[in-house]
Image: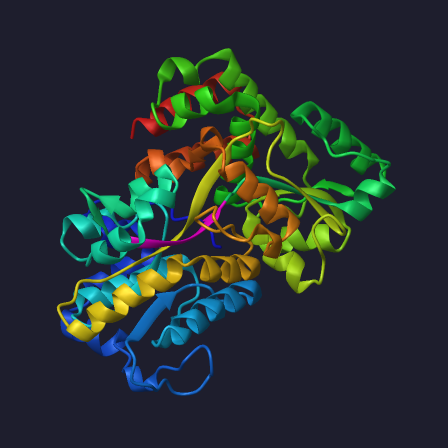
Amino acid sequence: MRAPLQKYGRLKTIIRTIGNAIGTVFSMSLVSTATLLSVPAAAQTSVTTGKPAGGTGPRAEVIHWWTAGGESSAVKSLAESYRAAGGVWIDNAVALGEQARAVALNRMVGGNPPTAAQFNTTNQFKDMIDQGMLNNVDAVAQRDGWDKFLPEIVLNIVRVKGHYYAAPVDIHMPTWIWYSKAVFKKAGITTEPKTMDELFIDLDKIRAAGFIPLAHGGQSWQDNIVFTTVLSNVGGRELYLKVLRDRDQKAIMSEPFKKVLLTFKRLQSYVDKGSPGRNWNDATAMIINGKAGVQFMGDWAKGEFSVAKQEADRDYGCIPGFGDKSLYIIQGDVFVFPKTTQPDQIKAQNLLASVIITPSTQVAFSRNKGSIPIRTDVDANKLDACAQKGLAIMKDKTRQIGNGEVYLTPDQNGALADALTNYWNSNIPVEKVQRNIISALGS
């Protein structure tokens, strides 16, 4: 998983908001576009073999940004499932989500679309639907009964006006609390914190024992994860929705939300001086190496623990939230299917959509990726202890909730992140921050 996309507007502003790279990409002529980024299928390689792709089954060229160790293993499992179903997987990995989406959109505009492209489980691709740039996979979704097992939040993203335009691959939860078992032991902490107040007590113990209490990467999207963790655990479901979904000014100026902001700011006092600009995986490495005690980060962090040969509940702990009613914030990835009328490509798209959703593929992918399956009717015994916790929570629909990008426009989400990062790094009165957030969410 990479930092979630912060800005993404109507199609005419996609050029400007998908990332700085896409502005350059879209400003090229279509001829230049096709020349620069159209890679012949013959030059592609199969991710399952590392050799030139061959075979006679449906050929699916898939653009994605899964390039890290655990991510590569996860996408390999998808490719193997697709090949087992009779298809040929043509891998096109592009580092960084913004770049991968830019390449996919550029290819579509240039008349040489891939078979499928990775996007996040957000409104990132809604403009493409509105502009008629995507094929639907209704036949597969209706045949396999996606509406029977997909969480409502995911269903409302992939199904638009009755048509299914994306196949969900996974569910990530961005607000897990990870901790080092070794550091906890050395700090004299014998039980997991059950409330935010208990967590602060443990952070103080960790600092007193000579360790960094909170491993954090000082980047806007990581600051936003810390804020969301506090909002969901301290504010609760009602306040979470009033602020992010309803943008209720009264709720934002309320004492409960002020408490959320003050708690968020208090956590900043537990990070080290090297925090600004640190990558998330480097912060995770601090937990792995026993230099820090706690990190707030999505469950994609498990890929780093796995590469380090560490196991959940043995070397590190994972807390999805405080209390038996804590929220499970749904984030994740989908594949969209660029518009095409070629029968062989439509066949490949439908086969890929079908393969992605199968229980066996879902489990194999999640074991490598650190996510949980998008369906609960899978063999949980094959998943790690943290994933089993997440899957159990997902069975309670009252605990499911969308991430900020589901409720906010990209501009609002970006403005909120800017306000939070400014507060995190500056001495600003909390009342001013509340007003800044009202302004940000009204953008």
What secondary structure predominates along the stretch shown in magenta?
strand
Q: Which residue is drawn at 51% across and 68% down?
A: 72
**In the picture shown, does residue 50 fall above or below 140?**
below
Residue 193 in which image quadrant: top right
What residue appears at the point 48 percent right and 51 percent down from the top-left corner? 373
Nearest the eye: 320 or 139: 139
Q: In the depicted view, which residue is nearer to us: 249 or 420?
A: 249
What colour scheme governs how the chains and residues are painted in the rendered image of this protein?
A: rainbow
Residue at the (17%, 64%) spot, across then down: 109
Picture coordinates of residue 176, whole percent (x, y): 59, 41
Res. 351 image quadrant: bottom left
Horizontal and vertical percent position of residue 439: 34, 25
User: Residue sitting at 56 percent across and 18 percent down?
Assistant: 259
| Magenta span includes 32 | no
Q: Is residue 343 left or right of residue 70?
A: left
Identify the magenta region.
Answer: 166-172
